[in-house]
Amino acid sequence: MSIKVTIWNECRHEKEDEEVRRVYPESIGGAIVAGLEPFGFELTLKTLDDDEQGLPASLLDATDVLVWWGHRYHEELDDTRIDLIHRRVIEGMGLVVLHSGHHAKIFRRLMGTSCNFAWREADDGECERLWTIQPAHPIAAGIPPCVELPKSEMYGEPFDIPVPDELVFVSWYEGGDVMRSGCVFNRGRGKVFYFAPGHETFPIYRDATIRRILANAVEYVNQPHATGWSLDHWARPIPLQKGAPRQTLFKKPRGAA
Amino acid sequence: MSIKVTIWNECRHEKEDEEVRRVYPESIGGAIVAGLEPFGFELTLKTLDDDEQGLPASLLDATDVLVWWGHRYHEELDDTRIDLIHRRVIEGMGLVVLHSGHHAKIFRRLMGTSCNFAWREADDGECERLWTIQPAHPIAAGIPPCVELPKSEMYGEPFDIPVPDELVFVSWYEGGDVMRSGCVFNRGRGKVFYFAPGHETFPIYRDATIRRILANAVEYVNQPHATGWSLDHWARPIPLQKGAPRQTLFKKPRGAA
Amino acid sequence: MSIKVTIWNECRHEKEDEEVRRVYPESIGGAIVAGLEPFGFELTLKTLDDDEQGLPASLLDATDVLVWWGHRYHEELDDTRIDLIHRRVIEGMGLVVLHSGHHAKIFRRLMGTSCNFAWREADDGECERLWTIQPAHPIAAGIPPCVELPKSEMYGEPFDIPVPDELVFVSWYEGGDVMRSGCVFNRGRGKVFYFAPGHETFPIYRDATIRRILANAVEYVNQPHATGWSLDHWARPIPLQKGAPRQTLFKKPRGAA
Amino acid sequence: MSIKVTIWNECRHEKEDEEVRRVYPESIGGAIVAGLEPFGFELTLKTLDDDEQGLPASLLDATDVLVWWGHRYHEELDDTRIDLIHRRVIEGMGLVVLHSGHHAKIFRRLMGTSCNFAWREADDGECERLWTIQPAHPIAAGIPPCVELPKSEMYGEPFDIPVPDELVFVSWYEGGDVMRSGCVFNRGRGKVFYFAPGHETFPIYRDATIRRILANAVEYVNQPHATGWSLDHWARPIPLQKGAPRQTLFKKPRGAA
């Protein structure tokens, strides 16, 4: 059964900024969808200006993997919608956060840090080289040791994230900077992949190797057994071990402990 | 210079519940303070019912390490106060979260997960054995391989936390359960230690070994060079590498990227 | 294409010890093979007393995943054979090390530590409960929160291993002990899974849940893209970055640096 | 009490190669000693050509932290001496491995991988920038976000090491490469720090910031409570839990399990 992927994109730059429209006439989200199409996923494209900010509960419930590209309008997202997305990740929905999504509410909530970093948008971009640190990682399948992006925006260290559970890529920039640019984080039953490349004025999402990385990432963060038991607050008043002390439930009207 | 430690405690159980008052007449926070006193810290005890919920900004700014014991009233904490505490941890303030603090707003925010787990409060407690998994860890200094707590509340797996950066203790319970009960997490410049033992009706904070663990933890999460550079959103328009492309600042009124 | 799995087993206990023969008349290796059969792997069973200690280079080269059960005769393995196995793991061969294999030469070499732990073989065994710490991990697919093994040998903490890259299971023992009993380690391009249960006088490898864990582990440590580039000592005298300094090769007859 | 540091250095380049002698007339080891002197350690300098290859058992037993610089003669080290050093690290001795020590027997043994990486020795060196990834880490105390080394040898990814327990520095090179250049690994009770900079023909060990990093590393890998209990193979025939099954010792002449 194919993986159900929802690509969410602010899709405002494309309307506001001619330069972005020239690079991505089909919108950034559209370019991501086009890149994922050959891989057999079931793809849905949604934007901030769609109904319910593009992410109604019914769609989230039917989504295996959510791909996120946002930038200038992070704060517009309703907190209750972030609650929903957050709950879905904890339940096992995969999440791929791209580029400027580092400051998206959902990413910051999942990380628990500021997610700040250094940045420089050189006027005509600068060269980025993405080094594969874990060549046997599923997200690196088919990817060479080094991927060169001739024009990129610099996103660099120090990057205020928790230590990633898996560090797949580290980037080099022409201007002298480095970045942990491909990071996996486990949160609840869900997997999150942050991937730094992808500025709105450079056609990075048309690059075949980048598209392969995105497809690998979608497959990797998809949890094939997400329908299993969940990580609930779980009262176990009767111990598994015979003869061990037990709890008289409802003795006192208590909370968790 | 001695470490400035603020012990924060809800301090409501002690007023509401005779059983807790009998075990901790000096309050849970008072018992923690008494346990830390021989170690030479500068100790301040605060409670939920103090001014500004016990945690004014001026106190937080002067705190090196905050020790947290809360249980039933997590939701009363103002979100703006949690913002302050959160910012201080990212800046480098140490945080020790005890027992039922797993559901405290500040802990959940730093973790990005539900922090749910399994639990059982056997009527007269049950035996917990705390095993030292990393004997050379500073928090385990002077601690034997196994610490026995004859009466404890069971807090067990699955525990919905991110993978700890350091797993120092794993607990065994009489009823058949296990728990990652001593965990270190790095967040920003700050260190967070979660420690599971410490139910309000068992005198665990009077145990000499537990007190040593708490003192070790305070020393460990204290960051001696917290006054260094911070993890800010950092524009670097001029590259370090000579001749590399630079950014014309203010060309367009942009956000982070 | 099905995964090629070689099950290696000392297969001496079965000849020397009537008790073991009674529990595993088909040998321990034979029971593991029987358990993996329904999962569609291509299975080969080898023992210490076969030609070339059961592991000729040609077989290792054709093996995707090696499953290891050894106990009393670890030291008989030739170091040159261990070199071969080690090289294959670095190249991407999966390795599943079972129970007393913790002291096998190949496991100690991959870990770099003593791999010591505590142990107790209660006369008629004791209850072990295996808790699933990472429910969404592929090795935990279809596995309940807790697996009860009524009769087991205790293998307990402190366990002198490097911090596992992934901790999937933690065990509880009737006698008061705990163990990180299901651990994943990445080494080179290879994945290693250590799994503690499986004493020779208890029929643990007949348990359907344990068999599912073993099958999951085989699938997980198998690296589908192991034929990619390898982690060699790699001279790059000509820099990728145009105009950057280069190395005049063979200027002086040098080693790596 | 001051930390007892043994600086071990091959000290052959300095005799064989005029270029090295010109940069380090006092030898590489001598420069490291000079750099550590202001920090109050008790320093001993030893070389490969000293008695017992510079590392008699009595000296190792009295060493808190061993600093290692080797390059061309790794294979000359006796395996029994490596056994001794290895045992000492497991017991808690700190180890700082510098530059070309990545291929030293002791480092490869502790890692369990090939420790291969990419390299380029540009004729007159190339610029390396060391980025501080974990600014609050004790090894980064007093270190700025970026340390520039105008002339360095490139040591780059992919680096075949296990995932570091702590990644403190990542390097950028002029030629387009990156490197996890400052890595902490825990092995047994010991801490190991690998630090990439330090080629024999560039005066990197005279750089004040590099010296501070080395001093911080010595303090960090020193284990103040290394005299505690050790990680032995530990028989526990009598369970801690009363009434649980016990083992009749010596029933049969058995090994560990």
Image: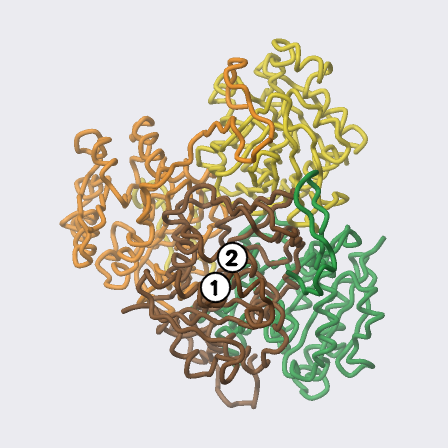
Chain colours: A brown, B green, C orange, D yellow
Where residue A89 sits: x, y (%)? 47, 71
Q: Position of residue A156 (x, y in %)?
A: 63, 51
- Chain bearing tag 2 is A
Above or below, A16 relative to D162: below
Residue for badge 2 = A195
Coordinates of residue C28 in the picture (x, y in percent): 21, 48
Report whether D101 appears left or right of C6.
Answer: right
Residue at the location (29% across, 35% down)? C73
Pick the front one: B39 or D14: D14
Q: Nearer the viewer, residue C122 or A90?
A: A90
SS type, badge 1:
strand
Which comes sooner in the sequence, label 2 or label 1? 1
Co-location on one chain, circles 2 and 1: yes
Residue D255, position as x, y percentages in the image: 34, 40
Task: Name which quarter of the figure residue A75 lies in.
Answer: bottom right
Give the label on residue A96, or none. Answer: 1
Q: Residue at x 36, y 37 (%)?
A: C106
The amino acid at mark 1 is Val
Crowd tier of the residue under label 1, counting other residues whose Cα lies within 10 Å: few below 14, some 14–19, many 20 or above:
many
Residue plotted at (45% across, 58% down): C178
Please give the name of the residue rendered at 59% of the width and 16% of the height, measured from the top-left corner. D48
Question: From where the camera sits, is residue D244 visible?
Answer: no
Please, which chain is the residue tagged with disc 1 on?
A
How crowded is the residue under tag 2: few (<14 C-alpha within 10 Å), some, or many (20+)? Answer: many
Question: Quick one: SS at disc 2?
Answer: strand
- Residue type at numbered disc 2: Phe
Give B209 or C102, whichever is nearer the viewer: C102
Toward the left, the furthest residue is C26
Question: Considering the image in quadrants, where does the C terminus of chain B appear?
Answer: bottom right
Whether residues under marks 2 and 1 lie with C-beta atoms below 8 angstroms apart, the answer is yes
Q: Which mark is residue B23?
A: none
**In the displayed structure, would residue D13 be above or below residue C256?**
above
